[in-house]
Image (cartoon, rainbow, N blue to C red):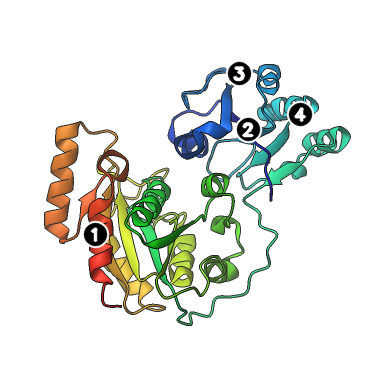
Amino acid sequence: MEIARPYLLFLGDVPDDLAAKTAYGIVDWRRDWCVGQLRLPGCQADAKLPDLDIAAAVHAGARTMIVGVVNPGGVLPEHWVGTIVTALEAGLDIASGLHMRLGDVPEIAEAAARCGRTLFDVRHSREKFATGRGTKRPGKRLLTVGTDCSVGKKYTALALEKGMRERGLNADFRATGQTGIFISGRGVSVDAVVADFISGAAEWLSPANDPDHWDVVEGQGSLFHPSFAGVTLGLLHGSQPDAFVVCHEPTRTNMRNVQHPLPTIQQVIDATIAAGSLTNPGIRCVGIAINTEKLDETSAKAICAETATTHGVPATDPVRFGVDGIVGRLIEAFAEE
């Protein structure tokens, strides 16, 4: 899959920042690949890129328009179709991470064929996966897990890959969602894999490797989220992590889009060890990543310090304070292995 750059990021008319997290992730890690953003009236998200219409984006060199949003069910709103067709007619390819396939919309499929443009549905892999086996394989793996969805598992994994490499470790980020795939250029969107094959897809994504090699696997959902726990569990069993980092957003009380209360960090640690021990009895927590975006500097430092003391592992905001402490604990924990 070769998605042509630069990108125009399409934000539609999403109601908040979290709904545009695909676009935000691309900007945060691949800003130089983006020429601008296209927002419809009423859009409440802003990726802090130049606002361009399609003609201006093409003039600026854009080659692909990415649908940079997420929503429950991964549907493509009908009133976005006209904008996508216009982009195709202007010479842009279209890439989407939604569950709904672009080619399943007749107007989009017809316009792509008529204009000779390519549609990329990155959530739908062409790979055929086997069922998971749970057999121990060489190499080491770290998985980010969460108290909820959209708490920073991808950002934490990317920050850890960078921090591990800076400390001389052989580490590679493994994308398991659409944004990660746009950022890294490879991966598999596990929430679009048929349920029986999720653990097998995770095994395929993090295969046998050198003993000192680390796959840093992007987590999905939460074991406690009633909508996404199935994907989370399959990813946990298949990635077979030696280590995991818990990601948490401290200002929430309920999990996103449901009425269920947020679990505690300790509940997530205990549940991850209990479930993960099926395929790796040596699984252990090496750190906690706290999304402090909604806290001031003093409060952010205080909650990180308090969390570290409570749980006995380093706690940090990877974006705000870095991941040196977690990487140091990882090196220390596996020094003799």
Residue 90 left/right relative to 217: right
Q: Please name the residue that numbered disc 4 is placed on.
A: 85
Callout in the foreground (4, 1): 1
Amino acid identity at mark 2: Pro
Contact between labelled residues 3 and 2, with CB atoms less than 8 Å apart: no
Question: Of marks 2 and 3, which one's residue comes earlier in the chain?
Answer: 2
Q: Are marks 4 and 3 in contact (CB under 8 Å)?
A: no
Earlier in the chain: of badge 4 and badge 3, it is: 3
Where is residue 10? Give x, y as percent: 60, 29
For mark 1, what is the residue? 328
Q: How far apart are marks 4 and 3 (CA)?
A: 16 Å
Residue ID for mark 3: 52
Discs 1/3, front: 1
| Label 4: which secondary element | helix
The Cα atoms of the two marked residues, 2 and 1, are separated by 36 Å
Q: In which quarter of the image is residue 229?
A: bottom left
Residues at marks 1 and 3, CA–CA distance in whole angstroms: 44 Å
How many residues crowd mark 3 within 10 Å: few (<14), some (14–19), many (20+)?
some
Left or right: 62 in relation to 236? right
Q: Which amino acid does label 3 sit on?
A: Leu
Image location (x, y in percent) of residue 256: 39, 44
Q: Which amino acid does label 4 sit on?
A: Val
Looking at the rendering, which quadrant does residue 233 occupy?
bottom left
Q: Between tags 4 and 3, which lies in front?
A: 3
Q: Which residue is drawn at 70% across and 36% down?
A: 94
* Residue in the picture at 61% in, 18% down: 52
Q: Check disc 1 and give the amino acid type.
A: Gly
- Residue to which mark 2 is pinned: 6
Residue 159 percent across, percent down from the top left: 37, 48
